[in-house]
Image: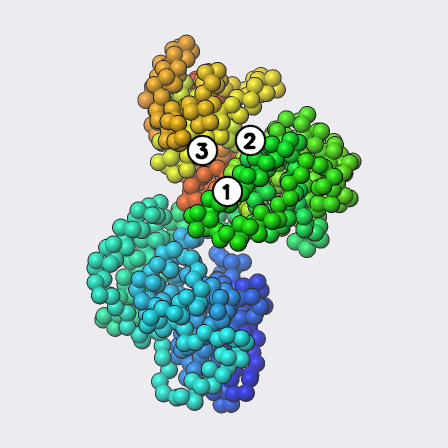
Amino acid sequence: MGAKYETRGDVAVITLDNPPVNGLGYDTRREFAAGIDRAVADPAVAAIVITGAGKAFSGGADIKEFGSPKAIAEPNLLSLIKLLEDATKPVVAAVHSVCMGGGLELALGAHYRVAAPGTNVALPEVKIGLIPGAGGTQRLPRVLGVETALNMIVSGEPVKSEVLASLPGQKLFDRIIEGDLLSGAVAFAGEMAKKGGALPRVRDMKVTHRDPDAYFGFARNMVKGMAKNFPAPAKCVDAVEGSVRFSKSGKFDDGMALEREIFIGLMTTPECKALRHAFFGERAASKIPDVPEDTPQRKIEKVAVIGAGTMGGGISMNFLNAGIPVTILEMKQDALDRGVATIRKNYEAQVKKGKLKQDKLDARMALLTPTLNYADIAQADMVIEAVFEEMGVKEKVFTTLDEVMKPGAILASNTSTLDVNKIASFTKRPQDVVGTHFFSPANVMKLLEVVRGEKTAKDVLATVMSLAKKIRKTAVVSGVCDGFIGNRMIEQYSRQAGFLLEEGCTPEQVDKAVEKWGMAMGPFRMGDLAGNDIGWAIRKRRYQEKPGMRYSKTADLLCELGRYGQKTGAGWYDYLPGKRDAMPSRLVVEMIEKHRAELGITPRKISDEEIVHRLVYSLVNEAAKILEEGIASKASDIDMVYLTGYGFPLFRGGPMCYADQQGLFNVVHTMKKFAANPHDDASFWQPAPLLAKLAAEGKSFT
């Protein structure tokens, strides 16, 4: 892993070679610098081409070195860029496939740049709470103009090389090379060597704007409205504005100093720490401690889905979108027809919005085969059941699947709470059974909880985790327990929400407090959306299984009134026909007040801070138990579940990351206060042993 050196005639070619995306790690930087020095010193070399091996020019910093001394060891990226700028021979960057972050900043240090069509070009640092830190905010405006550059830096989104090359006046790319990029780059470098004269440097270019004060004022207002909880986008505006200001005075290095100052300041913000935690957490989620990365996988070329309802249809769409044929099975023709029609309707809605072409719709629907016959799914490589959440129903389905499915087929259950080990016991092949808990709407929500049974084979687990990437899901492995990771935690969150009502809050007050804090939706609006009858069914089961666990009766009283949520036009809130706007309900408030009086509770004023901490710390305490039991293998997995499946605010990094930032000592201290509340559940607020241990030792979850 480093950089390769070769010559083609009188042109030296230095190739970044650090798979998978040629990250600019220490060894790579060191060998790259040595290659530049060698080429400059060799009198037989007239020009230099830098490029990347494999499927990338460079994706930027090597994430394996983040936070380690190697990340900033010399030669650092700034030093490499200076080497290129100071080279006495023409340096041509030949970019292809991926040219992002530090990779783009490196290319901007070259005298010339050529690109293969289709190259994804980006400065995505804003997505981890930073701005570019090696001159991106100063050089990109010089080659693309202020407005295009700022849009790219603030969004962090990639733009194709040919699009950028077509912009009037752009100086990013000197040539788009069709065909063999390296041969074209070597020929271009030879031309530049023969041309002679002073070598152009991006730092020497001027950057101007016809009305900078008005433009940057407008940009700040736009960013403020779109990214109010994230400091980095506004700081991008400051840095790019600096490129214009310091260009006037000819002080490029002052612009670089401003960029560096902003970059270092952002590194320590809680938002940046949260975003970096999420960035690494998403990548770590696919790593399972006892399942090696080279575990052989089963071939998944055809998938079957049992059930054509909301979940079955949504699950099917994920595979159709990825080009994987799906056979969808139902028991009755009308249910099957309805399910297929809904899938088509969802795709047609995307076509109307311009998000999907008609030919793509036709291609996806052509991959879908509806059937009423189990025999038609027998040769599928994987089958996912999405039937009613009742163990007796699951038993019938899995007994049948065991009889009809070919050997080696993966049998998956979309259960959200039921025991996957028991489901596996309905078959003679428990090693092939796994839970795949999709979140509704399944074709939209990013999270997939992969539930590992006691006997689930390692190759089944590896296959499902890999398949999740193909269907663009963030997969997190959970052990078997009631509710798995996400729903087990949300039950405690919902219990606290109920106690808050009894003590003096309204549903609206609770929802507003936690939504202002950053949650996408408060617990009562969430209940109305999901269906309050679902929670009611779980509580009825709990009353039998765990008679000692206390719940507020307000939710049961609501359901006894038939107020199940949006689907009935009334829940914790009132809803107008055909609309989803939650309107406070006087009837519900009176119901709560009456129940409160029956309990003999005098309502008190409850602060937003108490509301937020009772809800969020209930997640944290239950999560600590989940970690200790081995249901989740690492704290970041729990955070990924909540960031991708439950609307937890990204800028807070997930419940475990948030608890760490508050300090676990402080979390435990606050929980002790909650335990002293006579109307709360004191036993629940006893810190989980792992939480108590980490707090006592001054340690953290993440």
Question: Looking at the figure, which quarter contains the N terminus?
Answer: bottom right
**Whether residue 195 is situated above or below residue 570 in the rendered picture:** below
**Whether residue 186 is situated above or below residue 301 in the rendered picture:** below
From this viewpoint, is residue 376 visible? yes
Q: Which mark is residue 616?
A: 3
Q: In the image, what residue occupies the spot 39% across and 38% down?
A: 518
Q: Nearer the viewer, residue 382 or 199?
A: 382
The residue tagged with tag 3: helix, strand or loop?
Answer: helix
The residue tagged with tag 1: helix, strand or loop?
Answer: helix
Percent position of residue 196, x then y: 39, 88
Q: Amino acid at mark 2?
A: Arg
Mark earlier in primary sequence (2, 1) = 1
Percent position of residue 193, x then y: 44, 87
Mark earlier in primary sequence (1, 3) = 1
**Whether residue 472 is situated above or below residue 383 in the rendered picture:** below
Tag in front: 1 or 3: 1
Q: Which mark is residue 601?
A: none
Q: Residues within 10 Å of mark 1 (few under 14, many from 20)?
A: some
Describe residue 558's horizontal placement relative to residue 27 as left or right.
Answer: left
Q: Amino acid at mark 1?
A: Asn
Describe residue 220's horizontal placement relative to residue 598 as left or right.
Answer: left
Q: Nearer the viewer, residue 542 or 556?
A: 556
Q: What is the quadrant of residue 525 in the picture? A: top left
Disc 1: which residue: 346
Disc 2: which residue: 488
Q: What is the quadrant of residue 544 in the picture? A: top right
Tag in front: 3 or 2: 2
Mark earlier in primary sequence (3, 2) = 2
Q: In the image, what residue occupies the spot 35% across and 85% down?
A: 198
Give how far apart the Cα atoms at labels 2 and 1 are.
31 Å
